[in-house]
């Protein structure tokens, strides 16, 4: 079991902070709790400002409910301070990564990575399900976030 000293600060970023990144935040928090890892800071944020202050998309809420995973987040935008506050900033797709890097201050300590790079099944991209007609893409996002959360935590052992 990880001690407090092993605890990390993790920020998930996607375009709107209402679909993928709040799901990733909720799922990592859930896996941390299951493993008994304490003292972590997990948050999520957006590239864009459209949904700031709003809760997650109703389909993301429904998928989390179905899996009994608590999700409590209000959308916020990525800030310059985040780059030195968090150990890891995870993006969901290549566009997120280039947008994150474009907003970085001159010097920073966070590692910027695709969350999918920790997927044991090697599915690198967590696709944006926002414009889908149903919640299938949200369920898939949940499954990817679960695998990547386990993979990420295993990589730190
Ligand atoms: P997310 O999905 O980046 O996974 O939160 C999106 C949510 C909203 C928009 C785009 C993607 N939007 O354009 O409003």
Image (cartoon, grey):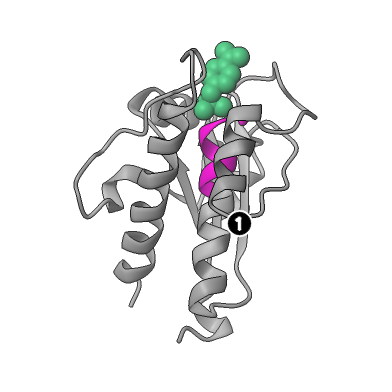
Residue at image coords 44%, 37%: 139
Q: Is residue 20 magenta?
A: yes
Task: Give the number of callouts.
Answer: 1
Q: Is residue 35 above or below residue 117?
A: below
Residue at image coords 48%, 77%: 35
Residue at image coords 57%, 50%: 25
Describe residue 148's horizontal placement relative to residue 91 as left or right.
left
Location of the C terminus (image quadrant): bottom left
Would you say the magenta stretch is mainly helix, strand or loop?
A: helix
Percent across and percent down for residue 69 are 60, 55
Q: Ligand 1 is located in which of the four quadrants?
A: top right
**Residue 147 makes an appearance in the image:** yes
What residue is pinned by disc 1?
42
- Please provide the residue range marked out in magenta: 17-24
Q: Is residue 41 above or below residue 11?
A: below
Q: Is residue 39 above or below residue 147?
A: below
Q: Is residue 72 magenta?
A: no
Percent across and percent down for residue 154 are 32, 70
Label 1 element class? strand
> Between residues 97 and 57, which one lies in front from this camera angle?
57
Describe residue 57's horizontal placement relative to residue 11 as left or right.
right
């Amino acid at each position: 079991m990880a001690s407090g000293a092993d605890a990390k600060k993790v920020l998930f970023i996607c375009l709107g902070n209402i679909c993928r990144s709040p799901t990733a935040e909720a799922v990592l928090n859930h896996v941390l709790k299951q493993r008994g890892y304490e003292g972590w800071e997990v948050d999520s944020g957006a590239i864009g400002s459209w949904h700031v202050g709003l809760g997650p998309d109703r389909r993301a809420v429904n998928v989390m409910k179905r899996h009994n995973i608590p999700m409590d987040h209000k959308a916020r935008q990525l800030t310059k301070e985040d780059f030195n506050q968090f150990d890891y900033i995870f993006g969901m797709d290549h566009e997120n990564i280039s947008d994150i890097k474009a907003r970085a201050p001159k010097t920073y300590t966070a590692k910027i990575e695709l969350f999918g790079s920790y997927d044991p099944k090697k599915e690198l991209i967590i696709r944006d399900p926002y414009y889908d007609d149903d919640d299938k893409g949200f369920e898939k996002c949940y499954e990817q976030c679960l695998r990547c959360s386990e993979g990420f935590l295993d990589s730190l052992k």
